[in-house]
Image: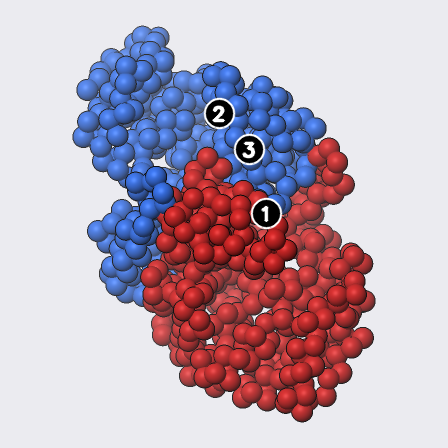
Chain colours: A red, B blue
Amino acid sequence: MADVITSEYRLAVVPGLTRFVATVLERVGIAPKDAAIVADVLVAADLRGIESHGVARLESYYVSRLRGGLMVPHPTVTTVRETPTSILVDAGNGLGHPVAKRTMETVLAKAEETGSAFGAVRNSNHYGIAGYYAMLALERDMIGIASTNTVRYGAPTYGRDVLLGTNPLAFAIPAQHEPAFVLDFATTTVPRGKIEVYNRKNKQLNPGWAIDAQGRETLDPQTALTGALLPLGGYGVEHGGHKGYGLGLLVEILCGVLAGGKFGLDLPLPSDGPQPGAISHFFAAFKIDGFRDPAQFKADMDVELRSFKDSQKAAGQERIYVAGEIEYEKALYNREHGVPVHVKVWDGLQKLAGELDIPFDIAR
Amino acid sequence: MADVITSEYRLAVVPGLTRFVATVLERVGIAPKDAAIVADVLVAADLRGIESHGVARLESYYVSRLRGGLMVPHPTVTTVRETPTSILVDAGNGLGHPVAKRTMETVLAKAEETGSAFGAVRNSNHYGIAGYYAMLALERDMIGIASTNTVRYGAPTYGRDVLLGTNPLAFAIPAQHEPAFVLDFATTTVPRGKIEVYNRKNKQLNPGWAIDAQGRETLDPQTALTGALLPLGGYGVEHGGHKGYGLGLLVEILCGVLAGGKFGLDLPLPSDGPQPGAISHFFAAFKIDGFRDPAQFKADMDVELRSFKDSQKAAGQERIYVAGEIEYEKALYNREHGVPVHVKVWDGLQKLAGELDIPFDIAR
């Protein structure tokens, strides 16, 4: 994995980077307890190799929205409805991470009591990686689920209006010695950021990624940026695109509609620019011991995951992964060797440190 | 939809067809209450246009296994573990449909009491369409989830061993005037039956469907039949194949591992021929009123679903569907005009009627 540490990246230490992110957020008005949660979620993304959802967003998304008055630093968070197995929270247009973590913790506490519980949050903002919240279930021997809707980027099967977010779904299931099964995926084939990268590199897209403004599949990144992303499975139904569209709409419903938040045409488009808290989240957890002894279950999980990993490789391939394994290994490696931060992001953080007069001591 | 009623199909009436299927099952030793459930699930599939999971399987799958002693007509069904929010059932190698329906009904009754519940069944057999069980939640103003593992047909991303079933996932969410959102999909791009059809027609496969025995993508149906199906998203990671693989493995875990049933390498391959009850199922349900007033939620569902259906169509396309809508319309049409049954299936049923000395009065 040393390949990611090129001259384009510098290495940060986890405690220093986490402290720095939290301090920045405190300086722009976030309560220390909330800032610590956001910092932990953002650094967790970088540790796991998901740069797009890590500290790269600190200034460009979170700080700029707080400074611009689009997000509330001390939101009034209210419980809208609550039962022994469910909770609906209004985030009051605050940062997504603190309300998401606390709501998932409430869901886990309820599931501890009752066996299973569900939660939703509305009027919230981008909460980082969905997998973070699903993974909170792992140490409790539960199965965790987390999801969120997003700004709109994608079109439905046979459509051309931009209607669907990247709408990720995450599931976390513990094993014994093997890394946990952590499936965390966008329901579009690729994120919009990938189209932008291909556009900068003037590189042709792969089939199944995007359509033009008339709804025709396109391999041209420039054209795709005026069109929409395709759902997982690609254009039409021949490759299963209707399944990805269905999953994206499922997330839209479980988040926006179930939470009584914004949904459908009321969700912002990227071209609308930054908008106040239009995002909703969904969470669920249930206890493994409602079905089996958790120790036996986790031992069987090891057998199951190994049977995939140890199976014969396709011609020319060296390794078969199970969901979450790449991210787990990157996190282990990066925790020891330092978190790679792209030089452009690094420079941005340093500039922010200067502006806010904060010590910049993140280097390894 | 009149296009499906060609000379290859004959039309059956719902009550006659249902009664006939139930009578056949009773004659081969199934209790009347169980036979009625199986008949209802099979006819529901044909009504919804999912022929592959309908009465076509009556003789070829269910009756032949009962006659061959591979499935137990009067199984000992036991509750292995039960809590207020969960139930694990051992199906005793009986028919899948009765135990699946009763377990989902138990899950719904538990969710009625507690707000949310989960269930699993092991040592069971093919249970028809997963959507049938998820849809049982609809009239109770709940969200229903159903899944099942299957015989192995597919390979993991970058693998070539046949390890994964078609492993369907189904979600059902009620609306007010619009048909319910019913997403019911295999986590492989296509079912194996589709490869067989293309092979008979000597037609090239689409990319993303299958690999050869060495794990290389193939468009040749004959070669694919000696290889494996690809997960939703296709070969490798460029089109999101790792996401479909992750979903397939998720189903494997939620069914086989969580239920303490067969999983991984212990699941049968098609080449093993018919095997006794190796299949497990998974169910979940939760109440909408744990979050919102169900009437308001369903009114919002109408708005949400219509915003997709009424959006602009891609060039050359006439209609955008939401999940479950095609099947809903087919069921409405077929209930009025008769259920199309392929002449080969029809002739098989007629032969079975003769063998078992049962009146064959299914014709419209």
Residue B114 is at least partly visible in this image? no
Residue at point 41% right, 26% down? B52
Q: Does residue B178 appear left or right of residue A265 in this picture?
A: left
Tell me which amino acid carries mark 3. Pro
Chain letter of disc 3?
B
Rendering quarter of residue A269: bottom left
Q: Secondary structure at mark 2?
A: helix
Q: Is residue B6 above or below residue B253?
A: above
Contact? badges 2 and 3 (CB < 8 Å): no
Q: Circle 2 sits on which residue? A: B193
Q: Nearer the viewer, mark 2 or mark 1?
A: 1
Q: Amino acid at mark 1?
A: Gln
Residue bearing the label numbered 1: A204
Residue that carries the numbered disc 3 in the rendered image: B207
Camera-nearest residue between B259 and B170: B170
- What secondary structure is found at the residue carrying circle 3? loop
Which residue is more in the foreground, A154 or A302? A154
Q: Is residue B132 left or right of residue A126?
A: left
Q: Is residue A200 above or below residue A59?
A: above
